[in-house]
Image (cartoon, grey):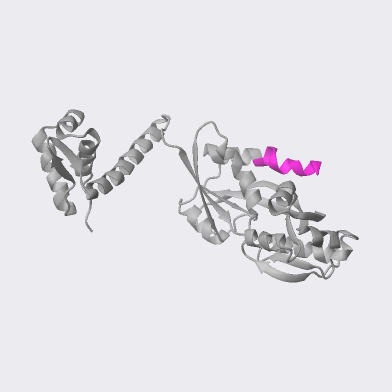
Amino acid sequence: MDWLNYHHLLYFWTVAKKGSITEACKELRLAQPTISGQLRSLEEQLGEKLFTRVGRRLELTEVGKLVYRYADEIFSLGRELTDFLKGKPQGRPARLIVGISDIMPKLVAYQILRPALNLGSAIHLVCYEDQPDRLLLSLSAHELDLVLTDAPAHPSVQGPVFSHLLGSSSLALFAAPALAAQYRKHFPARLDGAPFLMPMQNSMSRRTLGRWFDEHDIRPNVVGEFQDISLLNVFGQAGVGIFASPTVVEDQVRKYHQVALVGRLDTAKEEFYAISAERRIKHPAVAAISQSARQSLFTKEASL
Protein backbone atom coordinates (compact mmCIF):
# COMPACT_ATOMS: atom_id res chain seq x y z
CA MET A 1 0.00 0.00 0.00
CA ASP A 2 1.30 3.47 -0.92
CA TRP A 3 1.43 5.80 2.08
CA LEU A 4 1.21 9.54 1.60
CA ASN A 5 4.06 11.57 3.11
CA TYR A 6 2.19 14.14 5.19
CA HIS A 7 5.27 16.30 5.67
CA HIS A 8 5.43 16.72 1.88
CA LEU A 9 1.68 17.41 1.84
CA LEU A 10 2.08 20.05 4.55
CA TYR A 11 4.78 21.86 2.58
CA PHE A 12 2.61 21.78 -0.56
CA TRP A 13 -0.44 23.03 1.37
CA THR A 14 1.54 25.91 2.90
CA VAL A 15 2.98 26.97 -0.47
CA ALA A 16 -0.48 26.88 -2.07
CA LYS A 17 -1.99 28.82 0.82
CA LYS A 18 0.76 31.46 0.94
CA GLY A 19 1.06 31.75 -2.83
CA SER A 20 4.84 31.37 -3.05
CA ILE A 21 7.74 29.26 -1.83
CA THR A 22 9.35 32.36 -0.29
CA GLU A 23 6.35 33.04 1.96
CA ALA A 24 6.06 29.35 2.81
CA CYS A 25 9.72 29.37 3.91
CA LYS A 26 8.92 32.14 6.37
CA GLU A 27 5.90 30.26 7.70
CA LEU A 28 7.68 26.92 8.06
CA ARG A 29 11.12 28.35 8.93
CA LEU A 30 12.78 26.19 6.34
CA ALA A 31 15.24 26.90 3.53
CA GLN A 32 13.92 27.29 -0.02
CA PRO A 33 15.86 24.26 -1.42
CA THR A 34 14.29 22.07 1.27
CA ILE A 35 10.72 23.01 0.36
CA SER A 36 11.39 22.88 -3.39
CA GLY A 37 12.86 19.40 -3.01
CA GLN A 38 9.90 18.19 -0.94
CA LEU A 39 7.44 19.52 -3.53
CA ARG A 40 9.26 17.60 -6.27
CA SER A 41 9.15 14.45 -4.15
CA LEU A 42 5.39 14.83 -3.67
CA GLU A 43 4.83 15.35 -7.40
CA GLU A 44 6.92 12.27 -8.16
CA GLN A 45 4.96 10.21 -5.65
CA LEU A 46 1.61 11.36 -7.07
CA GLY A 47 2.79 11.22 -10.66
CA GLU A 48 1.26 14.65 -11.37
CA LYS A 49 2.39 18.27 -11.60
CA LEU A 50 0.85 20.31 -8.82
CA PHE A 51 2.10 23.79 -9.75
CA THR A 52 2.73 25.67 -12.93
CA ARG A 53 4.80 28.86 -13.06
CA VAL A 54 3.13 31.97 -14.49
CA GLY A 55 5.74 34.74 -14.54
CA ARG A 56 7.05 34.88 -10.99
CA ARG A 57 3.95 33.30 -9.52
CA LEU A 58 3.09 29.68 -8.85
CA GLU A 59 -0.41 28.61 -9.82
CA LEU A 60 -2.08 25.33 -9.00
CA THR A 61 -2.78 22.90 -11.81
CA GLU A 62 -6.19 21.20 -11.95
CA VAL A 63 -4.75 18.23 -10.08
CA GLY A 64 -3.06 20.64 -7.67
CA LYS A 65 -6.44 22.26 -6.90
CA LEU A 66 -7.90 18.86 -6.12
CA VAL A 67 -4.97 17.91 -3.87
CA TYR A 68 -5.20 21.29 -2.12
CA ARG A 69 -8.87 20.73 -1.26
CA TYR A 70 -8.03 17.39 0.33
CA ALA A 71 -5.01 18.82 2.13
CA ASP A 72 -7.03 21.74 3.44
CA GLU A 73 -9.61 19.35 4.87
CA ILE A 74 -6.94 17.12 6.42
CA PHE A 75 -5.07 19.92 8.18
CA SER A 76 -8.27 21.72 9.20
CA LEU A 77 -9.44 18.54 10.90
CA GLY A 78 -6.05 18.22 12.54
CA ARG A 79 -6.35 21.71 14.00
CA GLU A 80 -9.89 20.93 15.13
CA LEU A 81 -8.69 17.80 16.92
CA THR A 82 -5.90 19.58 18.78
CA ASP A 83 -8.23 22.47 19.70
CA PHE A 84 -10.80 19.99 21.02
CA LEU A 85 -8.23 18.17 23.13
CA LYS A 86 -6.99 21.47 24.53
CA GLY A 87 -10.53 22.66 25.24
CA LYS A 88 -10.29 25.62 22.88
CA PRO A 89 -13.28 26.92 20.90
CA GLN A 90 -13.49 25.36 17.46
CA GLY A 91 -14.04 27.35 14.31
CA ARG A 92 -15.94 24.56 12.61
CA PRO A 93 -19.45 23.51 13.74
CA ALA A 94 -19.50 20.45 15.99
CA ARG A 95 -20.82 17.41 14.13
CA LEU A 96 -23.74 15.42 15.49
CA ILE A 97 -24.21 12.18 13.56
CA VAL A 98 -27.57 10.57 14.28
CA GLY A 99 -29.10 7.29 13.15
CA ILE A 100 -32.90 7.33 12.99
CA SER A 101 -34.86 4.09 12.98
CA ASP A 102 -36.91 3.66 9.80
CA ILE A 103 -39.93 2.80 11.94
CA MET A 104 -39.75 6.02 13.95
CA PRO A 105 -42.20 8.85 13.05
CA LYS A 106 -40.11 11.55 11.41
CA LEU A 107 -42.11 14.38 12.98
CA VAL A 108 -41.19 12.97 16.40
CA ALA A 109 -37.55 12.64 15.35
CA TYR A 110 -37.53 16.28 14.28
CA GLN A 111 -39.05 17.45 17.57
CA ILE A 112 -36.45 15.43 19.51
CA LEU A 113 -33.52 16.77 17.47
CA ARG A 114 -34.64 20.39 17.21
CA PRO A 115 -33.06 21.53 20.53
CA ALA A 116 -29.62 20.55 19.18
CA LEU A 117 -30.01 23.18 16.46
CA ASN A 118 -30.86 25.88 19.00
CA LEU A 119 -27.65 25.64 21.03
CA GLY A 120 -25.43 28.67 21.38
CA SER A 121 -22.67 26.89 19.43
CA ALA A 122 -23.15 25.82 15.81
CA ILE A 123 -24.07 22.19 15.12
CA HIS A 124 -23.59 20.33 11.85
CA LEU A 125 -26.35 17.71 11.93
CA VAL A 126 -25.94 14.51 9.88
CA CYS A 127 -28.88 12.07 9.82
CA TYR A 128 -28.95 8.48 8.59
CA GLU A 129 -32.04 6.27 8.38
CA ASP A 130 -31.88 2.48 8.56
CA GLN A 131 -33.11 -0.56 10.44
CA PRO A 132 -32.37 -0.36 14.19
CA ASP A 133 -30.02 -3.36 14.29
CA ARG A 134 -27.82 -1.89 11.55
CA LEU A 135 -27.77 1.51 13.23
CA LEU A 136 -26.72 -0.05 16.53
CA LEU A 137 -23.84 -1.82 14.81
CA SER A 138 -22.69 1.56 13.45
CA LEU A 139 -23.10 3.08 16.90
CA SER A 140 -20.99 0.40 18.58
CA ALA A 141 -18.32 1.03 15.91
CA HIS A 142 -18.40 4.76 16.89
CA GLU A 143 -19.64 5.77 13.43
CA LEU A 144 -22.70 7.44 15.01
CA ASP A 145 -23.11 9.67 18.06
CA LEU A 146 -26.70 8.68 18.73
CA VAL A 147 -29.51 6.38 17.59
CA LEU A 148 -33.19 7.35 17.93
CA THR A 149 -35.65 4.47 18.04
CA ASP A 150 -38.82 3.21 19.71
CA ALA A 151 -37.25 0.41 21.76
CA PRO A 152 -34.20 -0.06 23.98
CA ALA A 153 -31.15 -1.81 22.56
CA HIS A 154 -31.37 -5.59 22.69
CA PRO A 155 -28.86 -7.23 25.08
CA SER A 156 -27.40 -9.17 22.15
CA VAL A 157 -26.01 -6.02 20.53
CA GLN A 158 -22.23 -6.26 20.35
CA GLY A 159 -20.23 -3.52 22.02
CA PRO A 160 -21.22 -1.21 24.88
CA VAL A 161 -24.39 0.74 24.07
CA PHE A 162 -26.72 2.41 26.57
CA SER A 163 -30.44 3.10 26.18
CA HIS A 164 -31.76 6.41 27.54
CA LEU A 165 -35.56 6.67 27.79
CA LEU A 166 -36.65 10.08 26.47
CA GLY A 167 -40.34 9.68 27.19
CA SER A 168 -43.58 8.05 26.11
CA SER A 169 -46.68 9.11 24.23
CA SER A 170 -50.12 7.67 23.71
CA LEU A 171 -51.25 7.09 20.14
CA ALA A 172 -53.95 8.74 18.07
CA LEU A 173 -55.63 7.59 14.85
CA PHE A 174 -55.78 9.81 11.78
CA ALA A 175 -57.23 9.61 8.29
CA ALA A 176 -58.13 11.78 5.33
CA PRO A 177 -61.04 14.03 6.40
CA ALA A 178 -63.83 12.07 4.64
CA LEU A 179 -62.59 8.74 5.99
CA ALA A 180 -62.08 10.19 9.48
CA ALA A 181 -65.66 11.49 9.56
CA GLN A 182 -66.93 8.03 8.61
CA TYR A 183 -65.17 6.23 11.47
CA ARG A 184 -65.17 8.91 14.17
CA LYS A 185 -68.78 8.16 15.15
CA HIS A 186 -69.21 5.40 17.73
CA PHE A 187 -65.46 5.28 18.30
CA PRO A 188 -63.86 2.84 18.93
CA ALA A 189 -66.41 0.09 18.14
CA ARG A 190 -66.86 1.49 14.63
CA LEU A 191 -63.22 0.60 13.85
CA ASP A 192 -64.00 -3.13 13.55
CA GLY A 193 -63.34 -3.96 9.88
CA ALA A 194 -62.07 -0.45 9.10
CA PRO A 195 -59.21 -0.07 6.59
CA PHE A 196 -55.88 0.38 8.38
CA LEU A 197 -52.32 1.18 7.34
CA MET A 198 -49.96 -0.57 9.74
CA PRO A 199 -46.26 -0.73 10.59
CA MET A 200 -44.48 -4.02 9.94
CA GLN A 201 -45.22 -7.02 12.18
CA ASN A 202 -41.87 -6.97 14.01
CA SER A 203 -42.12 -3.33 15.11
CA MET A 204 -42.88 -2.15 18.63
CA SER A 205 -45.66 0.18 17.43
CA ARG A 206 -47.38 -2.71 15.59
CA ARG A 207 -47.36 -4.78 18.77
CA THR A 208 -48.74 -1.83 20.75
CA LEU A 209 -51.59 -1.37 18.28
CA GLY A 210 -52.26 -5.11 18.25
CA ARG A 211 -52.70 -5.19 22.02
CA TRP A 212 -55.10 -2.23 21.92
CA PHE A 213 -57.19 -3.87 19.19
CA ASP A 214 -57.36 -7.08 21.23
CA GLU A 215 -58.44 -5.19 24.36
CA HIS A 216 -61.34 -3.61 22.44
CA ASP A 217 -62.24 -6.73 20.42
CA ILE A 218 -61.49 -4.94 17.14
CA ARG A 219 -60.37 -6.72 13.97
CA PRO A 220 -59.04 -4.08 11.58
CA ASN A 221 -58.88 -4.64 7.83
CA VAL A 222 -55.14 -4.19 7.20
CA VAL A 223 -54.87 -2.82 3.66
CA GLY A 224 -51.16 -2.02 3.80
CA GLU A 225 -48.02 -2.69 5.86
CA PHE A 226 -45.01 -0.39 5.73
CA GLN A 227 -41.43 -0.40 6.93
CA ASP A 228 -41.07 3.31 6.17
CA ILE A 229 -43.47 5.29 8.37
CA SER A 230 -43.16 8.37 6.15
CA LEU A 231 -44.49 6.35 3.21
CA LEU A 232 -47.28 4.97 5.42
CA ASN A 233 -48.32 8.53 6.25
CA VAL A 234 -48.40 9.49 2.56
CA PHE A 235 -50.82 6.64 1.87
CA GLY A 236 -52.89 7.77 4.85
CA GLN A 237 -52.99 11.32 3.53
CA ALA A 238 -54.25 9.96 0.20
CA GLY A 239 -57.24 8.34 1.93
CA VAL A 240 -56.17 4.71 1.59
CA GLY A 241 -56.67 3.93 5.28
CA ILE A 242 -56.49 4.95 8.93
CA PHE A 243 -53.05 5.26 10.55
CA ALA A 244 -51.63 5.84 14.02
CA SER A 245 -49.20 8.50 15.21
CA PRO A 246 -48.04 9.71 18.65
CA THR A 247 -50.21 12.37 20.25
CA VAL A 248 -47.14 14.51 21.06
CA VAL A 249 -47.09 15.50 17.38
CA GLU A 250 -50.86 15.47 16.85
CA ASP A 251 -51.06 19.09 15.68
CA GLN A 252 -48.11 18.67 13.32
CA VAL A 253 -49.59 15.48 11.82
CA ARG A 254 -52.90 17.21 11.12
CA LYS A 255 -51.24 20.20 9.53
CA TYR A 256 -48.42 18.48 7.65
CA HIS A 257 -50.46 15.58 6.25
CA GLN A 258 -53.79 17.44 6.00
CA VAL A 259 -55.64 14.73 7.87
CA ALA A 260 -58.23 14.68 10.64
CA LEU A 261 -58.35 12.99 14.04
CA VAL A 262 -60.35 9.77 14.25
CA GLY A 263 -59.76 9.18 17.96
CA ARG A 264 -57.15 8.81 20.69
CA LEU A 265 -55.91 5.52 22.09
CA ASP A 266 -55.19 6.67 25.63
CA THR A 267 -54.08 3.25 26.88
CA ALA A 268 -51.74 2.56 23.94
CA LYS A 269 -48.32 3.97 24.79
CA GLU A 270 -45.23 4.23 22.61
CA GLU A 271 -41.77 4.87 24.07
CA PHE A 272 -38.84 6.66 22.49
CA TYR A 273 -35.18 6.10 23.24
CA ALA A 274 -31.86 7.77 22.58
CA ILE A 275 -29.16 5.11 22.42
CA SER A 276 -25.53 6.13 22.86
CA ALA A 277 -22.17 4.43 23.18
CA GLU A 278 -21.61 6.12 26.54
CA ARG A 279 -23.42 5.58 29.82
CA ARG A 280 -23.13 9.24 30.79
CA ILE A 281 -24.03 11.58 27.96
CA LYS A 282 -21.21 14.06 27.30
CA HIS A 283 -21.93 15.48 23.84
CA PRO A 284 -23.59 18.88 24.51
CA ALA A 285 -26.09 18.46 21.67
CA VAL A 286 -27.12 15.00 22.86
CA ALA A 287 -27.48 16.34 26.41
CA ALA A 288 -29.73 19.15 25.13
CA ILE A 289 -31.85 16.65 23.19
CA SER A 290 -32.30 14.41 26.22
CA GLN A 291 -33.12 17.23 28.61
CA SER A 292 -35.63 18.91 26.29
CA ALA A 293 -37.41 15.65 25.48
CA ARG A 294 -37.85 14.76 29.14
CA GLN A 295 -38.76 18.23 30.40
CA SER A 296 -40.78 19.60 27.49
CA LEU A 297 -41.69 17.43 24.51
CA PHE A 298 -43.14 14.42 26.33
CA THR A 299 -44.87 16.49 28.99
CA LYS A 300 -47.13 18.20 26.43
CA GLU A 301 -49.38 15.15 26.22
CA ALA A 302 -50.87 15.90 29.62
CA SER A 303 -52.54 19.01 28.19
CA LEU A 304 -54.25 17.16 25.34
Residue depicted at x 34% and y 36% = 79
Q: Quadrant of the N terminus?
A: bottom left
Q: Is residue 193 visible?
A: yes
Q: Which residues are magenta?
A: 293-304
Q: Quadrant of residue 72?
A: top left
At 52% from the left and 60% from the top, the residue drawn is: 134
Residue in view at x 75 percent, y 41 percent: 300
Quadrant holding the C terminus: top right
Image x and y of residue 171, in percent? 76, 54
The mark tally for this picture is 0
Can you give x and y, in whole percent of width and height, for residue 272 in the image?
66, 51
Query: Is residue 9 covered in magenta?
Result: no
Examine the structure image and report whether residue 302 is included in the region drawn in magenta: yes
Residue extending furthest toward the right: 186
Direction from residue 170 to residue 123 in the image, left or right: left
Residue 156, visible in the rendered structure:
no
Residue drawn at point x = 10 percent, y = 34 percent: 32
Q: Is residue 165 left or right of residue 78?
A: right
Measuring from the top left, give residue 131's x and y in whole percent: 56, 61
Compared to 46, does 183 lie above or below? below
Within the image, what quadrant is residue 264 found in?
A: bottom right
Main SS, magenta residues: helix
The answer to whether 143 appears left or right of 300 in the picture is left
In this orientation, which residue lies closer to the viewer: 32 or 217? 32
x, y percent for residue 83: 38, 33
Q: Residue furthest left?
A: 33
Of 204 and 128, nearer the camera is 128
